[in-house]
C-alpha cells in the first residue's frame, strides 16, 4: 500500500512538471548535437550540462530516484569532456547521448505506466560509470532491506577441527567447480546446483554462527536462479566470486571464521535475487517476510522486458532477425530431408534450396555476419555448379550442404543468447566433428538416460535407508543397478566414470551393507558428494560426448577422500 501511495504522489507531482521535463530533455539533446558538430562550442556543452542539472533538480523534487542518479552520472561524464574534444572522447559523448535518449524513454515509460522502477536504469548508469572508470553500482543499489536482523555472533556446529577442515575443503572444491561452470556459461544449471549444494553444506557447518546467514542466502539464491532460469549476468558472476572468498577463509582459518559477518552488499544482492525470482518456495517467501521485504509482480522476467523497451529496438530487431532466419533454415532442412529420403529430387526442388541459400547469405551479410554469409554462399555456389552441369550432388556432397545449414542454425541460436558478436560469426568455421556410427550415438543416449536414473535411484535408496534408521532392505538392489550401468559406461568409452562408479559401489558395500553401525556423518556427506557429482557428470554427457571433466574430477576426489 505504501508503494502505491508513493507512486500516486510521484504521479501527481510529475503531471505538474511534465512539459518542463520534456522541453529540458529536448534542449539538452539539441545542445549535445550542436557540440558534436562543432566541438569548439563551449556554450553548447555548458547548456547541455545546465539542462541535465535542471533535470536532476526536478527528478529530486518529484522523487524519481533513478532519474536523479542517471542525471548525476551523465553530468559527471559531461564534465570530463573538454572543449575541442578529440576523437578519443567519442566514447564519453556516445555514453552521454545514450543517457539522454534513455531519460527521454523513461519519462515516456513513467507517463504511461505511472510506476517508478529505478532498477531499469542501472545498465545505462553503469555504462556511464565505466566510461569514466568508476566502479559499477551493484544490482541491489535501489533495493531497500533492513539487514540489522542478522544472527548474533556465535559458534559453528560442534564439529571436530579435523572433520571441519576436511568438510570445508570438500565444500569449497565443489563451490569452485560450480563457479567455474557458471563463469564459462556452459552447463549453467549444473553449476547452480553445485553452488546450492556447497552453500547448504557450509550452512550446516556454520550452525548458529553469523556466517550461516550468508550460506543460507547463497543456497536459496542459487536454488531460485536454477528454478526460474534467471540470468547469469556478469554482476551475478562477480557476486558468487565474492562469496567464494568466505569459503576460502573457512577452509584456511577454520571454524573461528564462521563468527565473521558477511558484507552487507553481498547479503543485499542475494536477498534482491530472491525478491526478483517470484519463487513460491516456502523457505524463500518466509525469509522475505521475516525481513519485511514486500514482493510484487515486478519479477525478473518483467524487469528484462521493460529494460529492453528502454534501450530501444535492438532486442526486438534481433528477435525478428533470428525468427526470420529460423524460418528460412527450417524450410531448407525440410527440403534436404525430403531429398535424403528419396521423396523429392526435381530441378524445381533444388532450385528452391539454391534460392533459400542465397537469401540466407544476403541476410547474414547485411547484419555483418560475413563468415556465415560466405559459408551459405559457398554451398549455394557448389549447388549451382551441379545444376548447371546437369548432375546431382552425391550423398557426401549433400551431407556437406546439410552440415553447413546446421552450422548456421547453431550460430543463430548463439545469436539469440549472446547477440551479434564475433563469436557468432566464428561458428561458421567450426571443424566438423568426427562422424560416429548412428548405433553408437543411440547407445550413448540410452546409456546417459539409464545411468542418470540408476544414480538417482541409488541416492533415494540411501536416503530411505537413513530415514528408516538403518533398514538395509532399502539397499537391496542398489549394487546390481550400479553394476549394470558401470558396464554400460565402459561400452561408451567412459572408463574413468566407470572406475569411479565401481569405487562408489565398494564404498556402499563396505560402509552401509556390510557394516554393523551407521557410518559417521562426514562419510555419508562425502558419499553423497560423490554420487551427486557423478550424476551431474552423466547429465553433462547428454550435451557433449566428453562431458564436463571438472565434475568427474570432483567425483573422483570424493571417493579418494573415502579411501577408495
Image (spheres, helix red, strand yellow):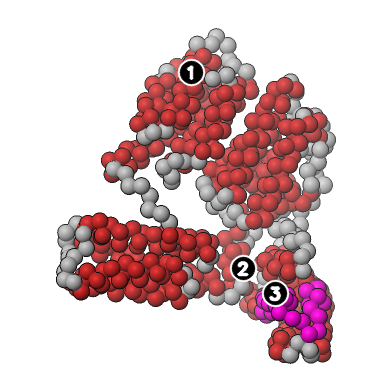
Does residue 95 belong to the magenta stretch? yes
Cα–Cα span, label 3 and label 1:
62 Å
Tell me the element at label 3. helix
Q: Are marks 1 and 2 in contact (CB under 8 Å)?
A: no
Task: Tell me if mark 1 has few (under 14), some (14-19) or many (20+) residues whose alpha carbon lies within 10 angstroms of its own.
Answer: some
Q: Is residue 175 above or below residue 478?
A: below
Magenta extent: 76-104
Q: Give the residue drawn at x 43%, y 72%.
A: 364
The quarter holding residue 524 reads top right
Observer-nearest of 421 and 387: 387
- For the residues marked 3 and 2, what is the alpha-carbon distance in whole angstroms? 22 Å
Residue 350 visible from this viewpoint: no
Mark earlier in primary sequence (1, 2): 2
Q: Nearer the viewer, residue 75 or 113?
A: 75
| Residue 307: mark in rendering | 2
Residue 42: x and y in percent read 82, 88
Task: Tell me, yes or no, if residue 122 can be seen here.
Answer: yes
Task: Residue 459: give x, y in percent of width and height.
Answer: 49, 28
- The image shows residue 43 at horizontal and vertical percentages of 82, 90
Q: Which mark is residue 419?
A: none
Quickly name the residue at label 1: 506
Eye-nearest disc, 3 or 2 = 3
Amino acid at each position: 500500500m505504501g508503494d502505491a501511495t508513493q507512486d500516486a504522489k510521484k504521479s501527481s507531482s510529475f503531471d505538474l512538471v511534465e512539459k518542463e521535463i520534456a522541453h529540458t530533455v529536448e534542449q539538452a539533446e539539441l545542445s549535445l548535437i550542436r557540440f558534436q558538430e562543432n566541438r569548439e562550442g563551449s556554450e553548447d556543452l555548458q547548456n547541455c550540462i545546465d539542462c541535465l542539472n535542471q533535470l536532476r533538480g526536478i527528478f529530486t523534487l518529484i522523487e524519481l530516484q533513478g532519474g536523479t542518479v542517471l542525471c548525476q552520472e551523465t553530468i559527471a561524464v559531461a564534465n570530463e569532456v573538454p572543449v575541442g574534444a578529440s576523437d578519443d572522447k567519442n566514447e564519453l559523448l556516445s555514453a552521454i547521448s545514450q543517457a539522454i535518449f534513455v531519460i527521454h524513454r523513461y519519462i515516456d515509460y513513467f507517463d504511461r505506466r505511472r510506476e517508478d522502477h529505478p532498477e531499469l536504469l542501472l545498465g545505462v548508469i553503469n555504462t556511464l560509470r565505466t566510461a569514466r572508470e568508476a566502479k559499477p553500482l551493484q544490482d541491489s543499489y535501489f533495493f531497500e532491506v533492513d539487514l540489522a536482523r542478522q544472527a548474533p555472533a556465535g559458534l559453528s556446529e560442534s564439529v571436530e577441527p579435523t572433520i571441519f577442515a576436511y568438510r570445508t575443503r570438500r565444500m569449497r572444491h565443489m563451490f569452485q567447480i560450480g563457479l567455474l561452470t557458471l563463469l564459462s556459461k556452459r552447463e549453467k544449471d549444473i553449476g547452480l546446483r553445485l553452488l546450492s549444494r556447497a552453500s547448504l553444506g557450509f550452512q550446516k557447518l556454520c550452525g548458529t554462527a553469523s556466517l550461516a546467514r550468508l550460506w543460507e542466502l547463497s543456497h536459496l539464491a542459487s536454488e531460485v536462479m536454477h528454478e526460474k532460469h534467471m540470468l547469469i549476468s556478469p554482476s551475478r558472476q562477480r557476486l558468487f566470486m565474492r562469496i567464494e572468498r568466505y569459503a576460502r577463509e573457512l577452509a584456511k582459518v577454520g571454524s573461528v571464521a564462521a563468527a565473521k559477518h558477511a558484507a552487507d552488499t553481498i547479503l543485499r544482492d542475494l536477498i534482491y535475487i530472491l525478491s526478483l525470482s517470484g519463487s513460491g518456495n516456502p523457505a524463500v517467501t518466509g525469509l522475505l517476510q521475516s525481513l519485511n521485504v514486500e514482493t510484487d509482480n515486478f519479477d525478473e522476467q518483467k524487469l528484462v522486458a521493460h529494460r529492453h523497451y528502454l534501450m530501444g529496438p535492438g532486442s526486438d530487431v534481433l528477435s525478428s532477425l533470428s525468427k526470420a532466419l529460423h524460418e528460412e533454415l527450417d524450410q531448407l532442412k525440410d527440403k534436404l530431408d525430403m531429398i535424403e529420403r528419396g521423396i523429392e529430387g526435381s530441378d524445381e526442388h533444388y532450385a528452391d534450396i539454391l534460392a533459400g541459400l542465397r537469401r540466407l547469405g544476403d541476410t547474414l551479410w547485411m547484419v555483418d555476419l560475413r563468415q556465415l554469409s560466405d559459408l551459405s554462399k559457398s554451398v549455394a555456389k557448389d549447388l549451382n555448379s551441379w545444376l548447371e552441369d546437369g548432375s546431382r550432388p552425391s550423398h557426401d556432397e549433400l551431407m556437406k550442404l546439410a552440415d553447413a545449414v546446421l552450422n548456421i542454425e547453431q550460430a543463430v541460436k548463439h545469436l539469440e543468447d549472446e547477440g551479434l558478436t564475433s563469436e557468432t560469426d566464428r561458428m561458421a568455421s567450426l571443424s566438423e566433428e568426427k562422424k560416429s556410427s548412428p548405433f553408437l550415438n543411440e547407445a550413448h543416449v540410452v546409456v546417459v538416460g539409464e545411468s542418470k536414473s540408476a544414480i538417482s535411484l541409488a541416492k533415494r535408496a540411501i536416503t530411505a535407508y537413513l530415514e528408516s534408521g538403518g533398514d538395509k532392505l532399502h539397499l537391496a538392489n542398489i549394487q546390481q543397478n550400479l553394476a549394470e550401468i558401470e558396464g554400460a559406461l565402459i561400452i561408451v568409452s567412459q572408463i574413468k566414470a566407470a572406475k569411479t562408479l565401481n569405487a562408489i559401489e565398494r564404498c556402499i558395500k563396505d560402509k552401509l551393507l556390510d557394516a554393523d553401525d551407521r557410518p559417521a556423518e562426514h562419510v555419508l556427506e562425502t558419499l553423497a558428494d560423490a554420487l551427486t557429482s557423478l550424476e551431474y557428470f552423466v547429465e553433462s554427457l547428454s550435451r557433449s560426448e566428453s562431458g564436463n571433466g571438472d565434475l568427474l574430477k570432483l567425483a573422483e576426489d570424493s571417493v579418494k577422500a573415502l579411501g577408495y
